[in-house]
Image (cartoon, rainbow, N blue to C red):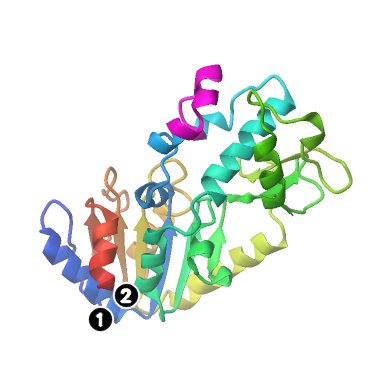
Amino acid sequence: MFSSTKTATSTSGFSERLADLQRLIADADYVLIGAGAGLTTAAGIDYAGEDFRREFREWIDRYGITDLYSAGFYPFKTDEERWAMWAKHIWFSRYRTGALPLYKNLLKMVDGMDYFVITTNVDGQFEMAGFDAERIFATQGDYCYFQPASGSPNELYHNQEWVEHALPAIRDCRIPTEMIPHTPDGQPVSMNLRCDDTFVEDSHWHQQAQRYSDFVRTASDRRLLLLEFGVGFNTPVIIRFPFEQMAAQFPDTTLVRFNRDYPQLSTQGISRYVAFTEGVEQIIQECTA
């Protein structure tokens, strides 16, 4: 059985919490991973850090862009400018690094276990690191896909080949007009990133949503370990609040939260809880050593 003792950052030392985590992993029947932006930041992709400032210097100087997230909403005057930025943006976030070591180590931590991943991240790191694609539900989209700008038809289009051709064609923060991407039948495209009601949820999205629901239902009365990484309050209704509700309602479930800034609980009645504000890289390395 899982320990029923609540272990919080403020009351327990790191070594005690690490021992709790290692025991929980060893005892779990099922592991559900929930990942937000903080995990990718910890892994080395910083949307406002040194790499961003180096790679986007021309855009920073020309448009005053301060970070990659807000760059996605910048009101460029032309499609040539907008898609030049997106070519660089997609490359930087999705294709530049390949699988990052932190994600590879996280896979080692749960390798051989019955796991599932739900993530709001759109960088494809779980799949690139070797997690089973059928066990990943990327709720908010993926940088590797275009979709019809109108949201219809309900189809997605891989963009890596376009990115590879567009990047070397960028001049003065623009791409040639003929390189502006379109659907196969010539309609405008947008990124498959959830920002409004045109977001395309294709058949694969719905299939993974069902697999996630099935996993939770199957694990609900077993020893379920919830590992929540870097999930804040931007979209808490997708991972953070549901994970707390599972920990409060399921009889043998423990929530382990890895969050430097927001380790606190919002839900009453959670007795099995461990929180880490320390660097997740060290914790995962300790668990995979």
Q: How many numbered marks have been drawn onto this rendered protein structure?
A: 2
What type is the residue that disc 2 sits on?
A: Asp
Q: Nearer the viewer, residue 241 or 82?
A: 82
Quadrant containing the N terminus is bottom left
Q: Nearer the viewer, residue 153 or 242?
A: 153
Q: Where in the figure is residue 263, as x and y percent of width and height? A: 27, 49
Residue at x-position 76% and y-position 30%: 176
Q: Where in the figure is residue 37, as x and y percent of width and height? A: 43, 47
SS for tag 2?
loop
On screen, 159 above or below 172? below
- Identify residue for label 2: 252
Instruction: Judge left or right: residue 52 versus residue 73.
Output: left
What type is the residue that disc 1 sits on?
A: Met
Residue at x-position 55% and y-position 30%: 71
Q: Main secondary structure of the magenta part?
A: helix
On screen, 98 above or below 86? below
Quadrant containing the C terminus is bottom left
- Identify residue for label 1: 1
Q: Where in the figure is residue 238, as x and y percent of width and height? A: 49, 52
Q: Where in the figure is residue 60, as x and y percent of width and height? A: 50, 23
Where are the magenta residues, as a range? 53-68
- Residue 58 highlighted magenta (yes or no): yes
- Residue 225 highlighted magenta (yes or no): no
Residue at x-position 65% and y-position 60%: 205
On screen, 33 above or below 155? below
